[in-house]
Amino acid sequence: MKSVDLSSPNPLEKLLQLIKQNELWEGERILQRNEYLKMDGTKDSRLYYIISGSLRVFVFDPDTDEEHTIRFGYQNNIITDLSSFITDAPSDFNIQALRQTHLRLISKNSYMQLINSSKETQQLWQQLLGQLIYQQMEREVDILTSSPKVRYQRVLARSPQLFQEIPSKYIAAYLRMTPETLSRLKKG
Amino acid sequence: MKSVDLSSPNPLEKLLQLIKQNELWEGERILQRNEYLKMDGTKDSRLYYIISGSLRVFVFDPDTDEEHTIRFGYQNNIITDLSSFITDAPSDFNIQALRQTHLRLISKNSYMQLINSSKETQQLWQQLLGQLIYQQMEREVDILTSSPKVRYQRVLARSPQLFQEIPSKYIAAYLRMTPETLSRLKKG
């Protein structure tokens, strides 16, 4: 495995650089708007790099017929069914393209081989997992926060890119508010 | 560092075994019921092993004066302010004993030295971080699930020990339901 450039502060960028240098990408996919990358009840443990476009991860709530969006993916980021990735089992998560989306993919096996090839790559992965845990804790506090305004401000501060890349109706659902409330909060 | 017994399927148990074998515990603490281990606005990146007792991690919601419990810790488990641990910064999390609680502690530095001492320990840590991410995704789905019954059943299936170790009023708040609803669901 080629060595890693330690000058970049971002563990994901370094890992992407290593995947590219070692030619580990295993294929590409193009999804049309609304097309599913993965449906609930199936397993997909691959990691996807988003060259362009955006996607959402959601679960279906049979008691209310609601879809609960739990994560978004957009350009230059990674998206995966984290549950399948971690457990190697089918999950309840759906992943759907929100517009035409171009992806590059790597299998969990190839990815973990890269990670376990050196202490440096293991440390990068640990950093990335730590970032994920931190984001998930912040998300948990978001959901439990009563004030729509505070929820909006927390997510805007943490993920400004979200508001550029994702259609408003999905952001509103993610923030558990109506599109009208989100629109009002955005204006002032 | 002494080597790890790979026969145990539980990464946390293996890591605890290594901490013990290498005599890395740095102290003990006894908390009385309702005493705080850590208050919001402060930083504490240590890991605590719970010899006996139980604790909760919560945030305070200033808009409603509510406390949102986001995690419990009980006997033979680890509790930490994950946010301080990951970011090395103060966090909004409080950690409070729910009964008299006996803890053993290790600093983040000593712990990470152990983790980074070999590829095997790094892999154990990766497994543990993966488990945490999985639990947090399940928790996110719990919170978003509309039916109190389904919320109760999901948490009971995943964390049966919770219902033995934690007082009902805290479990009810964690499940976002009244103590009466929880009591009704428990009866069947």
Image: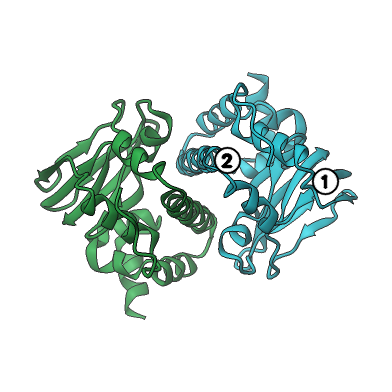
Chain colours: A green, B cyan
**Element at label 1:** strand
Q: Residues within 10 Å of mark 1 (few under 14, many from 20)?
A: many
Of all residues shown, which one is farthest toward the bottom?
A: A188
A160 to A179, vertically: above or below: below
Left or right: where A19 falls relative to B173: left
Question: Toward the viewer: B53 or A76?
Answer: A76
Residue position for label 1: B103
**Element at label 2:** helix
The quarter of the picture where residue B11 lies is top right
Earlier sequence position, callout 1 versus callout 2: 1
| Residue B179 shows in the view | no
The quarter of the picture where residue B84 lies is bottom right
Locate residue A96, reporting x and y percent.
22, 43
Left or right: where A6 falls relative to B143: left
Give the amino acid at mark 1: Leu
Question: Toward the viewer: B127 or A81?
Answer: B127
The nearer-to-camera label among 1 and 2 is 2
Left or right: where A24 falls relative to A171: left
A88 to A177, vertically: above or below: above
Of all residues shown, which one is farthest toward the top?
A: B188
B142 to A62, vertically: above or below: below
Q: Chain of mark 2?
A: B
Locate residue A75, reporting x and y percent.
22, 60
Residue A66, which numbered label?
Answer: none
Give the amino acid at mark 2: Thr
Residue position for label 2: B121
Q: Chain of mark 1?
A: B
Q: The N terminus of chain B appears in which quarter of the rendering?
A: top right
Locate residue B71, reporting x and y percent.
64, 46
Q: Residue at x 33, y 39 (%)?
A: A81
Locate residue A170, reporting x and y percent.
28, 55
Question: Toward the viewer: B12 or B143?
Answer: B12
